[in-house]
Image: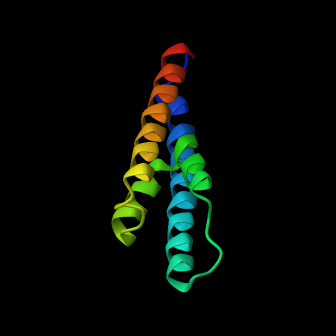
Amino acid sequence: MHSHATTWLPILAGYGVLSLISFFAYAWDKKAARRGEYRIAERSLHLLDLVGGWPGGWLAQKTFRHKCSKPAFQRVYGLTVLLNVAMLAWLLFHF
């Protein structure tokens, strides 16, 4: 018998770890932007969000007011969230 905890705990842990990584990546990029230093590529931020770090990315955007006013970035960010949630739903219902 397969319990819900064995299904959800690793997934939640993965989202937690990826969200922390994403949060700190956005923070690093905001700091670099202020200092005129080397930036993290937007595609890297989007990739982190796509694989499950989007909750941390969302929190970082709100916390640091970073990337919030860039419509093109927000469109791709929204797409990464939708794709991630769709992939998660597919996995949960098929396995």
Residue 5 as seen in the image, left or right of residue 74? right
Q: Position of residue 34 (x, y in %)?
A: 49, 82
Q: Position of residue 32 (x, y in %)?
A: 57, 78
Report the quarter where the C terminus lies.
top right
Residue at far right of view: 38
On screen, 5 above or below 51? above
For residue 59, which quarter of the picture? Answer: bottom left
Residue 56 as seen in the image, left or right of residue 21? left
On screen, 87 above or below 76? above
Q: Position of residue 45 (x, y in %)?
A: 56, 55
Which residue: 52% across, 79% down?
Answer: 31
The number of discs equals: 0
Report the quarter where the N terminus lies.
top right
Closer to us: 61 or 39 = 39
Residue 26 as seen in the image, left or right of residue 60? right
On screen, 80 above or below 90? below
Closer to us: 11 or 63 = 63
Closer to us: 69 or 65 = 69
Which residue: 60% across, 47% down?
Answer: 47
For residue 24, which quarter of the picture? Answer: bottom right
Which residue: 54% across, 38% down?
Answer: 11
Residue at far bottom of view: 35
Q: Position of residue 65 (x, y in %)?
A: 36, 69
